[in-house]
Amino acid sequence: MTPVPPVMSSKARLMLRTARTAFVSGLMLSGLLHATAQTPAPRLAAVPAATAARFALPASPKERLENSQVIGHLSGETAVTGMKLYLKPTAAQQADLDQLVVDQQTPGSAAYHQWLTPAQYGARFGLADADLSTLTAWLQARGFTVDAVAPSRNFITFSGTASTVESAFAVSMQRYRRDGREFFENSTAPSIPAALADVVGGITGISSFRAVPHARHIAAPQAKLTGDYTTSTAAHYLVPWDVRQIFGVNTLISSGFDGTGVKIGVIGQSAVDTAQLTYFQQKTGQTVKLPTMILVPNTGVSNKVDGDEGESELDLEYSGGVAPGASIQFIYTGCTSTTSTGVLSGTTNCGSNGVFDALSYAVTNAVAPILTLSYGGCESSYTTFATAGTTPFESVLKQANVQGQTIMVSSGDTGATSCEGSTASLVATGGLSVSYPASSMYVTAVGGTALNTDSATFWSSTNNSFEGSVNATVPGTTGPMPAVAWNDTVAYGSLSASGGGASAIFNKPSWQTGTGVPADSHRDVPDVAFPAAVEQHAYIVCSQGSTCSNSNLGFGTSNGGGGLVGGTSAAAPVFAAMLAVVEQANGGASLGNINPSLYTLAAGSSASSIFQDITSGNNIVTCKGGTTGCSSTSATTNGTMGFSAGTGYDQVTGLGSILATGLQAAFSTIANPSTLLTPSVVVAAATSTPTGGTTDLLSITVAGSGATPTGTVTVIVDGTALSTATALSSGTANYTYAVPACTATSACSHTVLVYYAGNAVYKPGSGTLTLTVPTTSTGVTPSFTLKAASSTVTTSAGGSTTNVIAVTPAGGFTGAVTFSAALTSSTGTFAGCYLLPTATVASAAVSSTMTIYTATTGCASSSALKSSTLAKLDTKPTQPGLPGPRAGLVVFSAGLLACFTLRKRVRAGVLIAVALSALTVGMTGCSSSGSAATAATTTSAGTYVITVTGTSGTLSTTTSFTLTVQ
């Protein structure tokens, strides 16, 4: 039942009209208004009242807060800038966007490489002007300053104080310390008026937790950098010319392609020292060309920040050095802290802005077609951004793809474990995990390799005018320079290896197929890899901590300075620069998400001329026994975790390193596909009306006007890839489809799409078929079961814990399962609430995570766990038009009114309106034993048996587990 919009006063209506008028006028002046046919329809009725019923948004990542120390409440006067309200498209807009992502990368499609501008994106997928003005008015009414609306109409940037944040979003803002860094964050889940739930996808910027750079540094002793940059053990170091030579970029540069006319956006969260950039370019034989500095608006003042400054100087020196003609755009955020001299400490709280804000700005303003980001962290530390169904930042990455932007992201530097609180240890304790946003399917994740030779065949004994020491014959007839997977953990003395593994959040993209790709149904990282070693063959830099000086002297002299750096932080900008040169050589056209093309090329006949397959080495590290993914299950015995490189794809180096000349030749047909033939793809079924629960044989034929097509096909049903790439034999292939039962009242329809990846002669293509499955015959009863992952969960009084509720279908059951929960026995007094999202079964088992809070703080927006004492309120007779009683749950408005009156005095009319609103949207409110007037606010120690009931239509089943509160 939809809540009745609150009645607005004449003053409020006037404020709304004024806000809307001002907002729309601003859009007209900025050229953002489009024709009526393009403008999305409004979805919001009015500005919600402060007392309106609320809707809970995703809470802060559990991993982040549980591994941090609370150091106090955040002062209410603290300025919080650059906050963003991310906005959701409609279901129709989302379906249109998902299809566009596919069509733009399918040669032959009318949308192929037809990129959108941010304004076009907003007109097609963004919010209506009226809704934007309503949201603007609501933010202003709650005390915020609205700073900007994104040109793409998918987020609003605003600012305020910590106390304003707490009031508007019903959160508690706390200060935390983790790994020597302080930050602030909401300790409870934020909520918004329920009337806004259809358009608001999430809030960012109310946490100042900043991503950590991936670089590994060694401050090089002056004596090490001499002559050909070798140590006493003959380990060579790299400058941009060396990188260009090893991977064939110099061959393209000698043909006149150096990236001129192509922009590369480097993402950072600190200002840089331009003197260091200048010195580096001078000493490596480049024409001095400083980047364009773009300080993201509303993020504070430009300041250098320890650690972040050095990261950005590395990225700028190698993106500009490998593509010397490219236009480098440095997009970075400021800091609320200030200093008149020197560099801010890395432990300084710089406010709530960082690299994610810089990347959002680079996307929503289309700053550059190629972006490189050398930051990231544990996926579970970014679930607010990345959890399926609540994906505000994922929407930004997807937007980049449809605008033709390619994003390179370093895969991480701690091997197969990206959740380490400290990398100083040699023993991993964070469990098997990958880094986000590298794990997103909308970015290219770049892992690390280590050059594996100091042979005179590949290295010269002297430096050239670019300070390079790689032989001019490389790669040449000797082939690529030998390399292995990067793992410096032992030599470096801390976790240092190529990040890689399987995502715990994202499913396998349909394009991620081929030899070596795990059949794990998960997005695997990385996609490619480039040098990242730090102990040998590291990159020379001029940056914070390795200051270069005196332009008349070289790196190796007593005053020359220079430092060494490695890690996937260096690998990402290197590949971004290579792509800029390749794009210029192919006419300068943007390529968008290149991952589908890379995996197609890796399966083709020309793969060896494009990819250097890394087959040796690993990212295996020692791990504490008993941690997730560790080979040892004993807490007293260490084990290992990680992956080894192998033939084809692997979860250490991806598809391997890339040779620029081969990539340019391959991408020339992708950028200019007119020379390729168009195939015919036909898919037929043994029967077009198969019975559910049986199999149907699909016959696939790919034909064309030239030679018989070769290559692979992928079967996709209702948008989900069901097979890995299947090789064609004489232009044909077969696939056995397991037909799901149809439990609907009428026949079920399934769309089968067969995608042909193409080859050197034919473009990619596709064919479709519709299957109609009759309703399941009588006697087969669809059903489902519930099971709690843990029979017992434990937390402290006032704390929180989680349990996973698995839903397993039977008899062809599909559909949404909603949950309720109740206490069936207890030895203490419960006061708290829970969150348990609806789970939707498509075919296989699914799960939903239940979060239980053992304090009433912030419970007004959550379904409440009710004690047996409060359950007696359910005996009230059902009123017409209102929900009836349900065992263990309280929906009568008296519960809400009693809870509400504990907080503040309000007018009786407002209380009655709120109570009636609460009845229409379902149960909300406080929870305790005893009467509401004497309600406890924190659960006492004891054991509590919780019974979870799952309901779908007339089907219902339960599972139970025990909560122990210490």
Image (spheres, grey):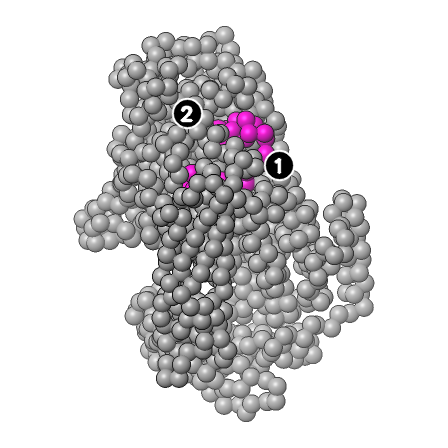
Residue 387 counted in the magenta span: no
Vertical order, 50 against 409 (above or below): below
- The residue carrying mark 1 is 367
Q: Residue furthest bottom?
A: 877
Report the residue at 74% width, 47% height from top: 32
Q: In the picture, which quadrant includes the N terminus?
A: bottom right
Vertical order, 112 against 138 (above or below): above
Across and down, in percent, residue 873 comes to 50, 86
- Magenta-drawn segment: 574-601
Q: In the picture, which quadrant includes the C terminus?
A: bottom left
Task: Find out whether the residues at labels 2 and 1 contact each other: C-beta distance under 8 Å.
Answer: no
> Is 537 situated left or right of 31 in this image?
left
Q: Amino acid at mark 1?
A: Val
Q: Foreground: 38 or 25?
A: 38
Q: Foreground: 109 or 285?
A: 109
Across and down, in percent, residue 497 comes to 32, 36
Across and down, in percent, residue 322 comes to 49, 24
Few, some or many residues within 10 Å of mark 1 (<14, 14–19, 20+): some
> Is 748 situated left or right of 155 in this image?
left
Vertical order, 389 against 929 (above or below): above
Report the residue at 54% width, 41% height from top: 592
Report the residue at 40% width, 73% height from top: 691
Total labels: the figure holds 2
Q: Amino acid at mark 2?
A: Phe
Q: Which is more N-terminal, label 1 or label 2? A: 2
Most prominent secondary structure in the magenta stretch?
helix
- The residue carrying mark 2 is 247
Residue 140: quarter of image:
bottom right
> Helix, strand or loop at disc 2?
loop
